[in-house]
Image (spheres, rainbow, N blue to C red):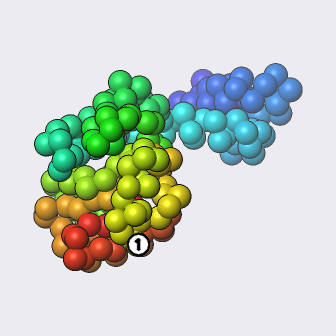
């Protein structure tokens, strides 16, 4: 009679060997699971790990409040390993150029950055949005009024936002953004926002 542990090891060997391909099957059965893992191709191991992370990764939620339009949106924008198109579209709409009504696709990495900022600061509030997408016309108008507005701003590419959080000190929000280290960070304490 085969011991239960040995039976489970053989079963795991058959399962993983089947994933690795027929050529490794004969080598893995007698040696048990330790040899099985060594015989797996690195790409397959990576695929298995990535798939398990996708399945168990929690949804990503973002909450925004547009100061100019008074629109508030809380959306699950990433779920089951992919961005949710309707939610991303809704976020893009809230982040539109309120002066012209132009809506443009925002870089979804920016949404992920905001999620990280929210988690890092422990905020429970919506991001207060001073500026999201800017059309070229709006950006040119703002650049004429202020020397602090770049003529070729990343706002025009949907890659920048000006934000603050009601429950987080502005200097702490800035420090968190710098600590995350994904892109430039502007600090505007007089007008009370952080550019990410």
User: Of 34 and 70, which appears nearest the observer?
Assistant: 70
Image coordinates for residue 188, horizontal then vertical, percent: 29, 74
Identify the residue shown where x is 39% and y is 71%. Answer: 148
Q: Which residue is mark 1?
A: 147
Quadrant assignment, res 91: top left
Say if 134 sits above or below 56 in the image. below
Identify the residue shown where x is 31% and y is 35%. Answer: 101
Q: How many marks?
A: 1
- Give the side of residue 51 with respect to residue 30, left or right: left
Q: Quadrant of the N terminus?
A: top right
Image coordinates for residue 119, horizontal then vertical, percent: 29, 58
User: Of 18 and 102, which appears nearest the observer?
Assistant: 102
| Residue 195 visible in the current orientation | no
User: Of 161 and 1, which appears nearest the observer?
Assistant: 161
Image coordinates for residue 92, horizontal then vertical, percent: 36, 36
| Disc 1 residue crowd, few under 14, some 14–19, many 20+, Cα 10 Å | few
User: Of 116 and 147, which appears nearest the observer?
Assistant: 147
Say if 53 sits above or below 144 in the image. above
Say if 10 sits above or below 161 in the image. above
Say if 89 sits above or below 64 in the image. above
SS state under label 1? loop
- Give the side of residue 122 with respect to residue 57, left or right: left
Identify the residue shown where x is 19% and y is 73%. Answer: 169
Of all residues, the one furthest to the right in this rendering is 23
Q: Quadrant of the C terminus?
A: bottom left
| Residue 4 visible in the current orientation | yes
Image coordinates for residue 110, horizontal then vertical, percent: 43, 50
Identify the residue shown where x is 40% and y is 63%. Answer: 144
Quadrant assignment, res 170: bottom left
């Amino acid at each position: 009679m085969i011991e239960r542990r040995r039976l489970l090891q053989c079963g795991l060997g058959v399962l993983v060997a089947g994933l690795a391909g027929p050529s490794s099957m004969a080598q893995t059965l007698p040696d048990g699971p330790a040899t099985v893992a060594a015989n797996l191709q690195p790409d397959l191991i990576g695929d298995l790990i990535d798939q398990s992370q996708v399945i168990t990764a929690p949804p990503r939620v973002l909450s925004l409040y547009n100061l100019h339009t008074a629109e508030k949106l809380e959306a699950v924008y990433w779920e089951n390993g992919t961005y949710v198109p309707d939610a991303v579209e809704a976020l893009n709409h809230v982040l539109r150029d309120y002066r012209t009504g132009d809506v443009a696709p925002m870089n979804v990495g920016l949404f992920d950055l905001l999620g990280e900022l929210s988690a890092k600061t422990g905020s429970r509030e919506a991001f207060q949005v001073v500026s999201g997408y800017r059309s070229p016309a709006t950006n040119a108008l703002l650049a004429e009024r202020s020397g602090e507005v770049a003529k070729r701003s990343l706002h025009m590419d949907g890659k920048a936002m000006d934000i603050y959080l009601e429950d987080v000190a502005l200097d702490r929000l800035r420090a968190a953004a710098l600590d995350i280290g994904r892109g430039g960070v502007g600090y505007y304490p007089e007008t009370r926002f952080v550019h990410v």
